[in-house]
Image (tube, grey):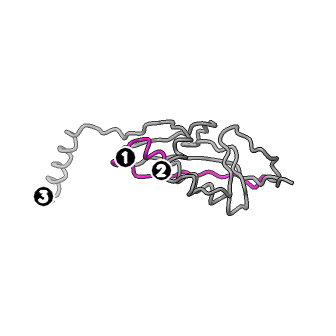
Amino acid sequence: MKKTFAAVAAVAALMSTVAPVQARDNKLTFPIAGAMSENEAKGRLGDDVQFFFGDQKPAGKVQETLGSDKTSQKTNSVGKSPQTACNWAFLSAMLQLKKRANALGADAIVNIQSNYNNQPLSSATDYECHDGAIMTGVALKADFVRLQKKK
């Protein structure tokens, strides 16, 4: 019992000498175009679903709205630049939105917005990313639609 108490006291004394560590959580924004030009994003996303960010509108009329969804994707940021890690997380989030669109039978995803911690940021040109010491994350929300076919 005395050894256990002594060990706990020693650990407590040691812990009191350690300075508190702050977790890194840098809020960053990066260009969507840059993320779409890396990691074979365009090829991996294919061309069966169209993507519209912020207030961008599709050329055709929306025939049917099929639902809304959101995704939050993370990637390991160790050894990566913030932009590299953010672009990976962005692509992962986009792939999740595409997977949902395919499941719903949507041919377009509109109103794509950043949505980290449920705080929307709508932009046609940039996305929000949170970069930490170990993990980097991107959260997106969007609406899934079927466009009228051109005659």
Quadrant location of the C terminus? Answer: bottom right
Density class for disc 1 (Cα within 10 Å; few <14, some 14-19, many ≥20) is few
Three-letter residue code for mark 3: Lys
Three-letter residue code for mark 1: Lys
- Taking the view exactly as shown, the residue that stands out farthest to the front is 151
Determine which quarter of the picture holds residue 44.
bottom right
**Residue 73 in the image: above or below residue 111:** below
Of the residues tagged 2 and 3, which is closer to the observer?
Answer: 2
Report how many numbered discs are placed on residues in the image: 3
Q: Position of residue 26 (x, y in %)?
A: 43, 37
**Residue 80: which numbered mark, if any?**
1
For the point 80% across and 49% down, which residue is it?
62
For the point 34% across and 38% down, which residue is it?
22
- Residue 42 located left or right of residue 1: right
Density class for disc 2 (Cα within 10 Å; few <14, some 14-19, many ≥20) is many
Determine which quarter of the picture holds residue 31.
top right
Q: Give the magenta-colored segment's residue range.
A: 65-89
User: How far, Cα to Cα, is label 1 from label 3?
Assistant: 45 Å
Q: Position of residue 150 (x, y in %)?
A: 83, 53
**Residue 66: which numbered mark, if any?**
none
SS for tag 2? helix
Residue 82 sits inside the magenta stretch: yes
For the point 40% across and 43% down, which residue is it?
132
Q: Which residue is mark 2?
A: 88
Density class for disc 3 (Cα within 10 Å; few <14, some 14-19, many ≥20) is few
For the point 37% across and 46% down, which residue is it?
80
Q: Position of residue 87 (x, y in %)?
A: 48, 46
**Residue 90 in the image: above or below residue 55:** below
The numbered mark, 1 or 2, whose residue comes first in the sequence reads: 1
Q: Which residue is mark 3?
A: 3
46 vs 5, nearest the viewer: 46
- Taking the view exactly as shown, the residue that stands out farthest to the right is 151
